Amino acid sequence: MSGLLQNLVDGLGQGSIYALLALGIAVIFGVMHLLNFAHGELITVGAYVTYFCFTRGISWYWIAPILVITAVLTSLLIEQVAFRWVRGASDSTLLLTSFGVHFVVEALFLMYVSASVKTFARPGWIANTVDLGVARVEVVDIAVISITIVVLLITAGILQRTMFGIALRAAATDFDAARLMGVRSNNVIRGAFALSGALAGIAAIFWLMRAGQATPGAGLTPMLKGVLAALIGGLGSLRGAVIGGLALGVAEVMLQSQLPSGIAGLTDAFVFLLIAMLFIFRPQGIINVGHAERV
Amino acid sequence: MSGGSAGPLLDVDGLTTNYGSISALRAATLQVRPGEVVGLVGPNGAGKTTLVSTLAGLLSPAAGAVRFDGADVTGFSPDTLLRRGLALVPEHRRLFPDLTVNENLKIGGITVPARDRAALIDEMVELFPVLGAKHDVSAGYLSGGEAQQLAIARALMSRPRLLMMDEPSLGLAPVLVDVVFDLIVRLREQGRTLLVVEQNATRMLGVADRAYVLRSGEIVAEGTGQALLADESLFDMFVGKHS
């Protein structure tokens, strides 16, 4: 029982990171219809920034905010350099552009930084656990879960209460109608990329604390998890993205611990099998985004 | 309200808009003066929606010029035109169904200073009391008549100098069609300037100061409502719609 609870907390910790990434992907998909396969590059860039800070002796307490700022700026830069030229283009053009950004960023790090693995120290407390009575859990899981809750509440507040949030939701439903109301496309798209970047930056903190290394392909796995989580939740649905992320994290950890040791290495394969089954029964994902929201 | 100029508020000269290789609107020339209610009537596919969509910046003209309050605004984006004072209630209303009535109104007033927004919403609720009763309801749950009132209120939130409406009575029950035309009369009494696309030509000509008749992408007639209603060459257009 305590093992199961421990796995659940572990899964929610992992899932929180996926949820933050998926939410950023869903925000951009909602406003631009872009499935952003370049989202992981925010983590790749963050990984090198972390490595650079590490070599300068900067502590994780400083690295954390630096990562969020870096991710926001990188996200805005990618929008400015790549995506603004394909606004309103077909879905496949957008998809190919995001793949292009992914490969270009990876290639730039390979060519101009290094092809080898750059390691940096994880925080000292990363493996610490606390005994909650019913289960022994990792401190980092508690940290990531509580910070994610706060971040999600702030994000919900922005989307529900601010003019920017209302404009973003309006533009996600009907972009032209929003422009007729005076919503500036630039503001709402840049705002979406900034928000998406901030969420990825917070995810990057915990992802990189665990990874402890930077490689040109560092962003690939988190990107795939984020995209998968967004798809599981129902692409375009923000709530769905969060649920999808948590579900993916919990499913991964549960399978890893419950599968017989001989096939535990096949966790990813089993996760994909579960996802395939989900899509057979609910092709639209967990949350069905209505007609109007898709237009 | 008129900006002090004696000339037309909206001055459209030779406006042509293409859909691919088809020109949906050919060399349209028209004017709207401050305080006027101008109708745009004509059969389905005549280019009425193309005309107002181009004027609102949703479509780019292939040729011609649009002047608003004396300044050239040809090819401007919708959000810039709105800031100049040119608002459109689009065809099919295009409310934001997942946003509440109140949020729809707020977004309509995104260009006005935040401190004026609450007072403007009160003003809209006074004009359309049903919106006050349903301020927290998602716009997607409104009836056709309520939705049309919200669409007009949302456009008025920006304090437009020229309000364009595209088929405001389309799809409404007859009793609600009356509500829409009563509203046009009320807005006219408030001194607002309106350019209204209507398929219901007879009704529109009854409330408009002047109207333009479109057919196959061209303006074929212009005049006061009474003059157009009396024009026998346009008779066929009105019979189908009048019942």
Image (spheres, coloured by chain):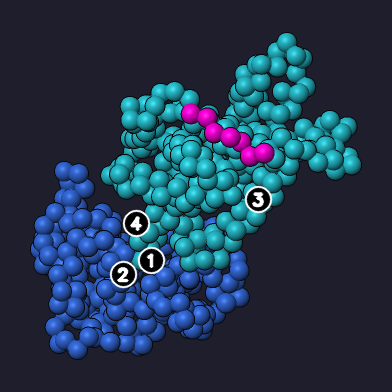
Q: Which residue type carries mark 4?
A: Asn
Which labelled disc corresponds to residue A181?
1
Nearer to the camera, A155 or B3: A155
Q: In this view, does A110 lie to the left or right of B1?
A: right
Which labelled disc corresponds to residue B58?
none
Check residue A122 for magenta coloring: yes
Q: Estimate how packed mark 1 is, as few (under 14), some (14 to 19) or many (20 or more) residues with alpha carbons within 10 Å.
A: many
Kindly report the distance in space between the C-alpha atoms of the residues bearing marks 4 and 3.
30 Å
Q: Is the magenta stretch mostly helix, strand or loop?
A: loop
**What colour is chain B?**
blue
For label 2, the residue is B82
For label 4, the residue is A186
Q: Given the image, what chain letter belongs to the residue carrying mark 2? A: B
Kindly report the distance in space between the C-alpha atoms of the residues bearing marks 3 and 2.
41 Å
Nearer to the camera, A58 or A170: A58
Q: Is residue A287 visible?
A: no
Q: In the rendered image, which quarter is residue B214 located in?
A: bottom left
- Whole-percent x, y for residue A118 in the image: 48, 29
Q: Can residue A110 be seen in this view?
A: yes
Q: Given the image, what chain letter belongs to the residue carrying mark 3? A: A
Q: Estimate how packed mark 3 is, as few (under 14), some (14 to 19) or many (20 or more) residues with alpha carbons within 10 Å.
A: some
Q: Estimate how packed mark 4 is, as few (under 14), some (14 to 19) or many (20 or more) residues with alpha carbons within 10 Å.
A: few
Kindly report the distance in space between the C-alpha atoms of the residues bearing marks 4 and 2.
16 Å
At 61% across and 36% down in the image, what residue appears?
A122
At 35% across and 57% down in the image, what residue appears?
A185
Q: Given the image, what chain letter belongs to the residue carrying mark 1? A: A
Q: What stretch is highlighted in magenta?
A: A118-124
Residues indicated by labels 3 and 2 sit on the same polypeptide chain: no
Q: Are marks 1 and 2 in contact (CB under 8 Å)?
A: yes
For label 3, the residue is A147
- Whole-percent x, y for residue A15 in the image: 65, 38
